[in-house]
Image: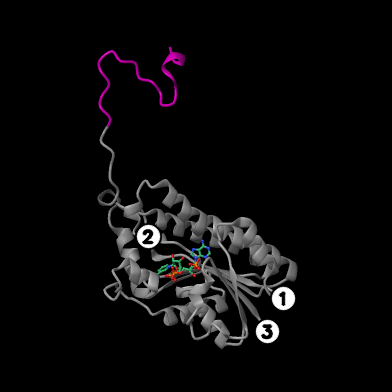
Amino acid sequence: MAHVLILGGTRGIGRALAARHLERGCAVTVCGRHPEALQGWPMAGHPALRVLRLDIADPAAVHAVVAEAGETLDVLIVTAGQYFDTRDHALDEAATLHLLRTNVSGLASAFEAGARRMLAQGHGRMAAVSSMAGLLEDRPGASVYGATKRAVLALCATYRKALAPFGIPVTALVPGYVDTERLRELNGGDASHKPFLMSEASAATRMLAAIDRGVAVDAFPWQMRVAVSLLNLVPRLSRVPEFPAPAAPDNGAVKRPIGVPRDTQE
Ligand SMILES: NC(=O)c1ccc[n+]([C@@H]2O[C@H](COP(=O)([O-])OP(=O)(O)OC[C@H]3O[C@@H](n4cnc5c(N)ncnc54)[C@H](OP(=O)(O)O)[C@@H]3O)[C@@H](O)[C@H]2O)c1
Protein backbone atom coordinates (compact mmCIF):
# COMPACT_ATOMS: atom_id res chain seq x y z
CA MET A 1 0.00 0.00 0.00
CA ALA A 2 1.49 3.36 -1.06
CA HIS A 3 2.22 5.72 1.84
CA VAL A 4 1.49 9.44 1.51
CA LEU A 5 2.77 11.95 4.07
CA ILE A 6 1.00 15.31 4.16
CA LEU A 7 2.60 18.07 6.23
CA GLY A 8 -0.30 20.41 6.95
CA GLY A 9 -3.09 17.86 6.53
CA THR A 10 -5.24 18.64 9.56
CA ARG A 11 -7.42 21.21 7.77
CA GLY A 12 -8.23 22.76 4.42
CA ILE A 13 -6.49 21.72 1.21
CA GLY A 14 -4.19 19.24 2.97
CA ARG A 15 -7.09 17.42 4.59
CA ALA A 16 -8.94 17.28 1.23
CA LEU A 17 -5.79 15.75 -0.30
CA ALA A 18 -5.72 13.21 2.54
CA ALA A 19 -9.33 12.25 1.76
CA ARG A 20 -8.53 11.72 -1.93
CA HIS A 21 -5.57 9.48 -1.11
CA LEU A 22 -7.53 7.44 1.45
CA GLU A 23 -10.30 6.93 -1.14
CA ARG A 24 -7.78 5.50 -3.59
CA GLY A 25 -6.47 3.02 -1.01
CA CYS A 26 -3.27 4.68 0.23
CA ALA A 27 -1.95 4.75 3.77
CA VAL A 28 -1.92 8.43 4.78
CA THR A 29 -0.08 10.26 7.55
CA VAL A 30 -1.21 13.83 8.20
CA CYS A 31 0.65 16.30 10.40
CA GLY A 32 -0.12 19.65 11.96
CA ARG A 33 0.16 21.56 15.19
CA HIS A 34 -3.49 20.88 16.00
CA PRO A 35 -4.39 17.22 15.30
CA GLU A 36 -7.61 17.79 17.27
CA ALA A 37 -8.86 19.81 14.28
CA LEU A 38 -9.66 16.45 12.65
CA GLN A 39 -12.33 15.65 15.25
CA GLY A 40 -15.69 15.40 13.53
CA TRP A 41 -14.15 14.91 10.07
CA PRO A 42 -15.95 11.90 8.51
CA MET A 43 -12.67 10.15 7.62
CA ALA A 44 -10.99 10.77 10.99
CA GLY A 45 -11.39 7.12 12.08
CA HIS A 46 -10.17 5.60 8.79
CA PRO A 47 -7.92 2.61 9.56
CA ALA A 48 -5.28 3.73 7.01
CA LEU A 49 -5.01 7.23 8.51
CA ARG A 50 -2.30 8.20 10.98
CA VAL A 51 -2.17 11.61 12.64
CA LEU A 52 0.96 13.24 14.08
CA ARG A 53 1.50 16.50 15.91
CA LEU A 54 4.20 18.52 14.14
CA ASP A 55 5.27 22.12 13.85
CA ILE A 56 6.93 22.39 10.43
CA ALA A 57 8.99 25.31 11.73
CA ASP A 58 10.93 22.82 13.91
CA PRO A 59 13.61 21.35 11.58
CA ALA A 60 14.61 18.46 13.88
CA ALA A 61 11.00 17.38 14.28
CA VAL A 62 10.42 17.58 10.52
CA HIS A 63 13.50 15.45 9.81
CA ALA A 64 12.37 12.86 12.38
CA VAL A 65 8.83 12.60 11.01
CA VAL A 66 9.83 12.49 7.34
CA ALA A 67 12.56 9.94 8.03
CA GLU A 68 10.38 7.60 10.08
CA ALA A 69 6.70 7.90 9.08
CA GLY A 70 5.35 4.82 7.27
CA GLU A 71 7.22 1.80 5.93
CA THR A 72 8.05 3.70 2.75
CA LEU A 73 7.60 7.31 1.70
CA ASP A 74 5.96 7.19 -1.69
CA VAL A 75 4.57 10.72 -1.78
CA LEU A 76 5.46 13.77 0.34
CA ILE A 77 3.08 16.75 0.07
CA VAL A 78 3.70 20.01 1.91
CA THR A 79 0.60 22.17 2.30
CA ALA A 80 1.47 23.67 5.70
CA GLY A 81 1.36 27.40 5.28
CA GLN A 82 0.38 30.57 7.06
CA TYR A 83 -1.37 33.48 5.46
CA PHE A 84 -2.77 36.75 6.77
CA ASP A 85 -3.93 40.00 5.32
CA THR A 86 -0.26 40.92 5.17
CA ARG A 87 -0.75 44.67 4.96
CA ASP A 88 -1.85 44.46 8.60
CA HIS A 89 1.52 42.90 9.36
CA ALA A 90 3.79 45.31 7.48
CA LEU A 91 7.01 45.84 9.42
CA ASP A 92 5.92 43.35 12.06
CA GLU A 93 9.13 41.36 12.51
CA ALA A 94 7.59 38.56 14.56
CA ALA A 95 4.86 37.93 11.96
CA THR A 96 7.35 38.07 9.09
CA LEU A 97 9.73 35.60 10.73
CA HIS A 98 6.83 33.29 11.56
CA LEU A 99 5.77 33.30 7.89
CA LEU A 100 9.32 32.61 6.71
CA ARG A 101 9.89 29.79 9.21
CA THR A 102 6.63 28.08 8.31
CA ASN A 103 6.27 28.68 4.58
CA VAL A 104 9.94 28.62 3.54
CA SER A 105 12.28 27.08 6.14
CA GLY A 106 9.70 24.41 6.99
CA LEU A 107 9.41 23.43 3.34
CA ALA A 108 13.20 23.40 2.94
CA SER A 109 13.54 20.98 5.89
CA ALA A 110 10.75 18.79 4.56
CA PHE A 111 12.17 18.59 1.02
CA GLU A 112 15.67 17.91 2.31
CA ALA A 113 14.46 15.08 4.54
CA GLY A 114 12.13 13.77 1.83
CA ALA A 115 14.88 13.79 -0.79
CA ARG A 116 17.26 11.84 1.47
CA ARG A 117 14.68 9.18 2.19
CA MET A 118 13.51 8.86 -1.41
CA LEU A 119 17.08 8.66 -2.73
CA ALA A 120 17.80 5.89 -0.20
CA GLN A 121 14.70 3.89 -1.12
CA GLY A 122 15.08 4.62 -4.85
CA HIS A 123 11.69 6.13 -5.59
CA GLY A 124 9.10 8.72 -4.55
CA ARG A 125 7.55 12.03 -5.51
CA MET A 126 7.24 15.37 -3.75
CA ALA A 127 4.93 18.38 -4.05
CA ALA A 128 4.33 21.69 -2.29
CA VAL A 129 1.58 24.28 -2.40
CA SER A 130 2.54 27.75 -3.61
CA SER A 131 -0.05 30.37 -4.59
CA MET A 132 -1.00 32.71 -7.44
CA ALA A 133 0.46 35.40 -5.16
CA GLY A 134 3.83 33.80 -5.89
CA LEU A 135 3.40 34.36 -9.63
CA LEU A 136 2.52 38.03 -9.28
CA GLU A 137 5.41 40.37 -9.93
CA ASP A 138 6.14 43.38 -7.73
CA ARG A 139 3.32 45.84 -7.09
CA PRO A 140 2.29 48.22 -4.29
CA GLY A 141 1.50 46.32 -1.13
CA ALA A 142 3.21 43.19 -2.44
CA SER A 143 3.17 40.94 0.57
CA VAL A 144 5.72 38.96 2.52
CA TYR A 145 3.31 36.08 1.91
CA GLY A 146 3.82 36.52 -1.85
CA ALA A 147 7.57 36.43 -1.30
CA THR A 148 7.30 33.18 0.64
CA LYS A 149 5.24 31.66 -2.15
CA ARG A 150 7.84 32.73 -4.74
CA ALA A 151 10.36 30.94 -2.53
CA VAL A 152 8.16 27.83 -2.63
CA LEU A 153 8.27 27.93 -6.44
CA ALA A 154 12.04 28.35 -6.36
CA LEU A 155 12.54 25.45 -3.92
CA CYS A 156 10.32 23.20 -6.02
CA ALA A 157 12.27 24.07 -9.17
CA THR A 158 15.62 23.47 -7.47
CA TYR A 159 14.68 20.10 -6.00
CA ARG A 160 13.00 19.10 -9.25
CA LYS A 161 16.22 19.67 -11.15
CA ALA A 162 18.37 17.97 -8.52
CA LEU A 163 16.14 14.89 -8.25
CA ALA A 164 15.21 14.48 -11.93
CA PRO A 165 18.21 12.20 -12.66
CA PHE A 166 16.92 9.85 -9.97
CA GLY A 167 13.35 9.69 -11.32
CA ILE A 168 11.87 11.60 -8.38
CA PRO A 169 9.47 14.29 -9.68
CA VAL A 170 8.78 17.46 -7.71
CA THR A 171 5.62 19.43 -8.39
CA ALA A 172 4.71 23.02 -7.50
CA LEU A 173 0.96 23.31 -6.99
CA VAL A 174 -0.29 26.85 -7.61
CA PRO A 175 -3.96 27.25 -6.82
CA GLY A 176 -6.16 30.30 -7.09
CA TYR A 177 -8.76 30.81 -4.35
CA VAL A 178 -9.85 27.64 -2.55
CA ASP A 179 -12.89 27.85 -0.28
CA THR A 180 -11.25 26.69 2.96
CA GLU A 181 -12.21 27.65 6.49
CA ARG A 182 -9.10 29.82 6.72
CA LEU A 183 -9.96 31.76 3.55
CA ARG A 184 -13.51 32.28 4.86
CA GLU A 185 -12.12 33.42 8.21
CA LEU A 186 -10.01 36.05 6.42
CA ASN A 187 -13.09 37.24 4.53
CA GLY A 188 -15.55 37.73 7.37
CA GLY A 189 -16.92 34.17 7.15
CA ASP A 190 -17.76 34.16 3.42
CA ALA A 191 -15.28 33.90 0.55
CA SER A 192 -17.91 33.47 -2.18
CA HIS A 193 -17.02 36.84 -3.73
CA LYS A 194 -13.49 35.64 -4.53
CA PRO A 195 -12.95 35.22 -8.28
CA PHE A 196 -12.97 31.67 -9.69
CA LEU A 197 -13.36 30.20 -6.18
CA MET A 198 -12.86 26.41 -6.06
CA SER A 199 -14.07 23.87 -3.52
CA GLU A 200 -11.47 22.02 -1.44
CA ALA A 201 -12.50 18.78 -3.15
CA SER A 202 -12.06 20.08 -6.71
CA ALA A 203 -8.71 21.68 -5.86
CA ALA A 204 -7.54 18.40 -4.29
CA THR A 205 -8.63 16.39 -7.36
CA ARG A 206 -6.69 18.74 -9.62
CA MET A 207 -3.60 18.59 -7.38
CA LEU A 208 -3.69 14.82 -7.18
CA ALA A 209 -3.68 14.58 -10.99
CA ALA A 210 -0.72 16.98 -11.21
CA ILE A 211 1.28 15.01 -8.64
CA ASP A 212 0.46 11.72 -10.41
CA ARG A 213 1.68 13.13 -13.73
CA GLY A 214 4.72 14.69 -12.09
CA VAL A 215 4.19 18.06 -13.77
CA ALA A 216 6.64 20.80 -12.84
CA VAL A 217 4.18 23.62 -12.09
CA ASP A 218 0.40 23.37 -12.10
CA ALA A 219 -1.25 26.81 -11.86
CA PHE A 220 -5.04 26.67 -11.88
CA PRO A 221 -7.78 27.54 -12.61
CA TRP A 222 -6.73 28.80 -16.01
CA GLN A 223 -8.79 31.98 -15.61
CA MET A 224 -6.66 33.00 -12.59
CA ARG A 225 -3.50 32.09 -14.45
CA VAL A 226 -4.53 34.37 -17.34
CA ALA A 227 -5.54 37.16 -14.93
CA VAL A 228 -2.14 37.02 -13.21
CA SER A 229 -0.31 37.04 -16.56
CA LEU A 230 -2.28 40.13 -17.61
CA LEU A 231 -1.58 41.88 -14.29
CA ASN A 232 2.11 41.20 -14.79
CA LEU A 233 1.93 43.05 -18.12
CA VAL A 234 0.78 46.29 -16.45
CA PRO A 235 3.70 48.73 -16.84
CA ARG A 236 6.15 48.43 -14.00
CA LEU A 237 6.21 52.17 -13.12
CA SER A 238 2.54 52.22 -12.29
CA ARG A 239 3.01 49.37 -9.83
CA VAL A 240 6.22 50.08 -7.96
CA PRO A 241 6.32 53.09 -5.64
CA GLU A 242 9.37 55.23 -6.43
CA PHE A 243 11.57 56.78 -3.80
CA PRO A 244 11.80 60.59 -4.05
CA ALA A 245 14.76 61.76 -6.19
CA PRO A 246 17.82 62.55 -4.01
CA ALA A 247 18.41 66.25 -3.35
CA ALA A 248 21.31 67.81 -5.33
CA PRO A 249 24.42 68.33 -3.16
CA ASP A 250 25.19 71.89 -2.00
CA ASN A 251 27.75 73.77 -4.05
CA GLY A 252 31.19 72.86 -2.84
CA ALA A 253 30.02 69.71 -1.03
CA VAL A 254 32.24 66.68 -1.64
CA LYS A 255 30.37 63.67 -3.08
CA ARG A 256 30.97 60.61 -0.96
CA PRO A 257 30.53 57.11 -2.43
CA ILE A 258 27.89 55.11 -0.60
CA GLY A 259 29.41 53.03 2.20
CA VAL A 260 32.61 55.09 2.50
CA PRO A 261 32.79 56.87 5.89
CA ARG A 262 33.59 60.57 5.78
CA ASP A 263 37.04 60.28 7.43
CA THR A 264 38.38 57.62 5.05
CA GLN A 265 37.71 59.47 1.80
CA GLU A 266 39.83 62.53 2.21
N1 LIG B 1 -7.13 28.59 0.47
C1 LIG B 1 -6.65 29.30 -0.56
O1 LIG B 1 -7.37 30.05 -1.22
C2 LIG B 1 -5.21 29.15 -0.97
C3 LIG B 1 -4.83 29.68 -2.21
C4 LIG B 1 -3.50 29.57 -2.59
C5 LIG B 1 -2.60 28.91 -1.79
N2 LIG B 1 -3.00 28.40 -0.59
C6 LIG B 1 -1.99 27.72 0.22
O2 LIG B 1 -2.44 26.41 0.46
C7 LIG B 1 -1.97 25.96 1.73
C8 LIG B 1 -3.15 25.48 2.55
O3 LIG B 1 -4.09 26.53 2.63
P1 LIG B 1 -5.49 26.29 3.39
O4 LIG B 1 -6.42 27.34 2.93
O5 LIG B 1 -5.87 24.86 3.29
O6 LIG B 1 -5.05 26.68 4.87
P2 LIG B 1 -5.53 26.12 6.28
O7 LIG B 1 -6.93 25.64 6.21
O8 LIG B 1 -5.15 27.16 7.26
O9 LIG B 1 -4.61 24.83 6.46
C9 LIG B 1 -3.26 24.98 6.68
C10 LIG B 1 -2.72 23.64 7.14
O10 LIG B 1 -1.35 23.85 7.41
C11 LIG B 1 -1.11 23.45 8.75
N3 LIG B 1 -0.08 24.29 9.33
C12 LIG B 1 -0.03 25.64 9.41
N4 LIG B 1 1.06 26.03 10.05
C13 LIG B 1 1.72 24.89 10.39
C14 LIG B 1 2.93 24.63 11.08
N5 LIG B 1 3.70 25.61 11.59
N6 LIG B 1 3.31 23.35 11.24
C15 LIG B 1 2.55 22.34 10.76
N7 LIG B 1 1.41 22.52 10.10
C16 LIG B 1 1.00 23.79 9.93
C17 LIG B 1 -2.43 23.59 9.48
O11 LIG B 1 -2.47 22.68 10.55
P3 LIG B 1 -2.36 23.08 12.10
O12 LIG B 1 -3.23 24.27 12.35
O13 LIG B 1 -2.83 21.82 12.77
O14 LIG B 1 -0.92 23.35 12.36
C18 LIG B 1 -3.39 23.15 8.40
O15 LIG B 1 -3.50 21.75 8.37
C19 LIG B 1 -1.23 27.15 2.35
O16 LIG B 1 0.14 26.97 2.11
C20 LIG B 1 -1.76 28.34 1.57
O17 LIG B 1 -0.81 29.36 1.53
C21 LIG B 1 -4.28 28.51 -0.17
Give the crowd class for mark 2: few <14, some 14-19, many >=20 residues within 10 Å: some
Q: Residue at 41% across / 73% down in the picture?
A: 220
For the question of whether residue 162 can be seen, the reply is: no
| Position of the N terminus by quadrant | bottom right
Instruction: Estimate the x, y position of residue 131 in percent, counting from the top left.
Output: 42, 65
Please give the range of residues in magenta.
246-266
Q: Residue at 47% across / 50% down in the picture?
A: 97
Instruction: Estimate the x, y position of residue 80 in percent, counting from the top left.
Output: 50, 66
Foreground residue among 255 and 177: 177
N-terminal of the two: label 1 or label 3? 3
| Position of the C terminus by quadrant | top left
Question: Quadrant location of residue 127?
Answer: bottom right
Q: Is mark 1 within 8 Å of ligand 1?
A: no
Type of the residue with mark 1: Glu
Magenta segment's dominant SS is loop
Q: Which mark is residue 84?
A: 2
Q: Give the mark toward the camera: 3 or 2.
A: 2
Residue denoted by label 1: 71
Foreground residue among 113 and 94: 94
Q: Dot 2: what SS?
A: loop
Instruction: Estimate the x, y position of residue 18 in percent, counting from the top left.
Output: 54, 79
For the question of whether residue 38 can be seen, the reply is: yes
> What is the CA distance from the residue labelled 3 to the residue labelled 2?
37 Å
Q: Is mark 3 within 8 Å of ligand 1?
A: no
Foreground residue among 145 and 53: 53
Q: Is residue 248 magenta?
A: yes
N-terminal of the two: label 2 or label 1? 1
Q: Residue at 50% across / 79% down in the picture?
A: 39
Type of the residue with mark 3: Met
Q: Dot 1: what SS?
A: loop
Residue denoted by label 3: 1
Type of the residue with mark 2: Phe
